[in-house]
Image (cartoon, helix red, strand yellow):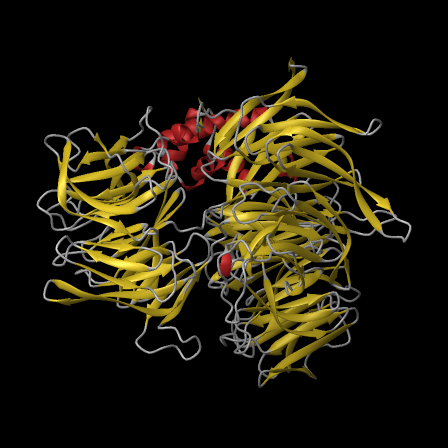
Amino acid sequence: MFGYVVTAHKPSVVTHSVVGNFTSPEKRDLLLARSTRIELYSISREGLIPLVELPINGVIVVMRLVRPPGEDRDNLMILTQRNKFCVLRWNITFQSVDTVCLGDMKDKLGQQYDGFPIGVADPQLRCFALHLYETVVKIVPGDFKKEAYPVRIAEKVRDIQFLEGTAKPTICILYQDNHRARHLKTLEIVLKEKDVAEGPFHQQNLEQTANMLVPVSQPLGGVLVFAENSITYLNGSAGKSTFLSQPAHIRAVGKIDDDGSRYLIGDHAGRLSILALERKGDEVIALTVSLLGVTSLASTISYIDNGYVYVGSAVGDSQLIRLITDPDPCTEHYFEVIETYTNLGPILDFVVVDPEKHGQGQVVTCSGVLKDGSLRVIRNGISVSGEAEIEVPGIKAVFTLKRKIDDPFHSFIFQSFIGETRVYELVEEEMIEAMLDGIVARTSTIFAANMERDLAVQVVESGVILLDSQTMNRVGSWTPHQGCRILVAKGNSHQVLLSTTQGHLIYLELDPVEPRLIQVSQILVEKEISCMDLSPLGSNPRAKSKIAVIGLWKEVSIKLLLLPELATITTELLGGETIARSVLLCTMDHIDHLLVALGDGHLWSYKLGMTDVSSVIRDRRRFSIGTQPATLSQFRSRDSWHVFASSDRPTVIHVGAGKMLCSNVNLRGVVSVAGFDTEGFQDCLAIATEKSLMIGRVDDIQKLHIRTVPLGQSPHRLVHLEDGRAFAVSLSGSIDPNGNSDEVEADEQWSIAIINDSTMEREHTVMLEPDEWAQALCRLPATKSDPEYLVVGTAFIFPGEEESHRGRILVYRLEHKQLVLIAEKEVPGGVLCVTPFYGKILAGVTSRACRVRLFRWTGTDDGSYALSEDCSHSGHIAVLQIKSKGDYIVTADLMRSVSLLAYKPVGGAIEEIARDYDGQWMTAVEILDADTYLGAESSYNFFALKRTDGTVDNLQRLEKIGYFHIGEIVGTFQHGSLIMSLPENESLARQTIIFGSASGLIGLVARLDEEIFRKLELIQGAVNQVLRGVGGLDHSEFRSYVDDRNTFECMNFVDGDLVERYLDLPKHDMEMVAKQVDSTPEELTKLIEELARLH
């Protein structure tokens, strides 16, 4: 097992946000923490402008801005999940971050704090306080010249904050006693003695649900205590409380005013309120809370300036909002949403599907919780949204023309059919068929385009027609020799290149004065020409082209020709027996390219190196973009040039970060495409399919497109019913008439919803019994005798019970978009997972004796079905997942790691044959092959297992053969890919596994051959030496496997995110890395670009 682990979609949850002067004394910045990344934004009138992204070798659990005394800029303090502490400072000169300090706060003997780690800083930066272990607060001196030291705290800490405006550093501690009562006390930190002293005040018997402290700025000072039913202000001499109108779990608080008089607070239901401290002088006389409206469920709130607020969410989309004085008439909220930022996290389940059978998978996730719960459809490719469509079968090519070449908009669409040409004209935003006397209508159009001086050209097999583009009247023509027909033609605003039946290649130019075409040169080509192009290279699409390219039938080659002489610059043999069917010269991202589409659906790409009038073809790469010949055409979208490959699997070819990418389009059977830009259809394409002419708008050219399907409830499990063309999803949480969902209570009903996989609309909902949770779903595929079924595994979870003792297995059939119950079986425990197996149902049932149970169908006298237990296997604690392959069954147990079982059909028994004897708290498992398995566990690690010949107690051992720290909680693995298969990729990746995480990350594990893997290991090490970790955090240590008992170095996995950062290195660093691995920058770039295309 040799694995390449790489990110396809970066973590999208926002756990921390801070606003301050990090990069400049004059400008305010917004910094966001997303799991293992920090994103830095500048704040302008236009909104948030991304500045830089910092990959962190660790999971960020604390992030704060701190201002050193006497300085005008803030430093950034971060703490990672492995207790690494560092402080960063922005280097204005180099526009990067410097490390102020780095420390390891790990305590080998300490008992890890069971809450979220706490890290706070004294406002005057005299010290930091970190609560990472029970009964211990670690103090870090602010000058970093002395070692950190521990302070013993006997109480059960719930929160810690530094008070502001104190003579000595003073922490305020919210704690819980043995009777679950909550209290508050303050302690002064005596740095010289490395000790603490009693602080200025304490408060006994706070509300039992008190869970958060917020320090109040001077001149008021003191602290706010947030509880479920009240908010209390304390400063030692006085205290004020306000009771909330309804219970609220406060999740986030953001200060508005520097004097601490107003705060924004967000609760568990997404309610955003403003808390005001009414004051008389320096005394707080009352607290008032006013509801502003409902946002995403906030995990962090940062007031930016001028009424702008960033609401970061770990369970829904984040938002940029602007506070307003009068309520919005539509929402009645006292704010408006300026921008919404997509978040996939937490991903509780997902499936990989291809409902339209495009040959490319898309991921559908269960994302978010409560009112922010949704399905997210993630597709790697380009989305074209239809603006208008006319049913016109039989179109072979389309060309779009303007009335004047300088016009911003198009006016005509030429449609070429077999033996006919039709023209649509745009008249007052309506497309009508135009009857134009100047064009040749009773034959196919080979090529048409605008030319300089408001002329247009139409090429048909009998000749070239020159038209006045405003009137479409004929003003000139050119005809080939008698008896010759034009077979292939291409042109631009100055030039036309064409080939005839007698093997002549003819080059025409537009006369600079007269409205006529002049034949400049002609050569005889022995091999018949299959395709050609002479698009201008560079930034000016109306320049004259200096070169042309032709494809030849019999020689299976392309020739690059010098214009106007038509002299051969170079000949490139394509190899194989498949000819070039379309060629294109284009410039994308300031790089000149030659693209060659072959008849079998493959695409060759070359880079062109220009030296005066000569060209050199280099960097040949091959892509698979379909199975049929493709036609290449350029189009412009959002001020950038891209290429559309029209074929059975339409593809957009674009360049991103210096890499050429091929992205599938959500269309089928595209014949021809041309740019079409009008006042009503701006930035659109005219797209001819086999049956229609469509005006479509291309969405943003990006790697992943995400569609949100709001549910308003928490989604838990998801399955795709292929025959029923629907998704089944288990949901919890109730929806009130206003569309808001509440937290799940013990007596609430769960449900199963059916959602159409095309429209993504809910078609049916089945409610389960009270206290019944739908924890497992699977699909039973159709057989010759039975249709497709949906299987639901449930658990009854009653208030006060620690473990479910009763559950059900429900079998449904989808009939007319409705779920019909076919069979049910009550079982003695909760059903945690179900999977199809040999036409039967495997279930993990938890009870006092957890078992893997196999249920079979049995018919009854009335023709209905019943479920009966066939056999079972005991010895498990809680089976969270079951995967199967052939007779083998692999289980992921909550505490007992991975077991391999085997089904004996003859005797009807399930036997355990191998086990991982290292107890792991599992979260996911997947079968790679009959002897190799991939696991994820609760300490954010991956590991690979292989069955060995050695035995223990007559059981084979599952030996760990790979370790990797992913830094994410991964709940599901699925076989699949987000891209269409490429020949090169098949040689690089033997297998790909997709995974999703709680942070919204979607990643890929690719199995590689050992030779490629060993080279990537060397590249990883060399890149790591060039790219030092932010804050001095070590990459090798971050990726090492650590759990409660063991630590192992990363083994047999490579960090693809680090490897692919090679492509962003400066040239001299690329050369340094290449030298270390005994290669060239070109070879490494090619290899890593191919790997990057895996995702």
- Residue that appears at 26% across and 38% down: 130
Please say if 494 is above or below 825. Answer: below
Please say if 805 is above or below 945. Answer: below
Residue 540, visible in the rendered structure: yes
Residue 564, visible in the rendered structure: no
Residue 358 x/y as whole percent = 69, 53
- 781 left or right, relative to 351: right
Residue 636 x/y as whole percent = 52, 63
- Residue that appears at 48% across and 57% down: 743
Camera-side residue of 84 and 1071: 84
- Residue that appears at 44% across and 37% down: 967
Q: Farthest residue to the right: give it.
A: 861
Residue 969 x/y as whole percent = 49, 40
| Numbered disc total | 0
Question: In which quadrant of the rendered view does residue 287 lie?
Answer: bottom left
Q: Farthest residue to the front: give it.
A: 179
- 789 left or right, relative to 30: right
Residue 193 x/y as whole percent = 11, 30
The N terminus appears in which quarter of the rendering? top right
Q: Farthest residue to the bottom: give it.
A: 428
Question: In which quadrant of the rendered view does residue 946 lie?
Answer: top right
Question: In which quadrant of the rendered view does residue 444 lie?
Answer: bottom right
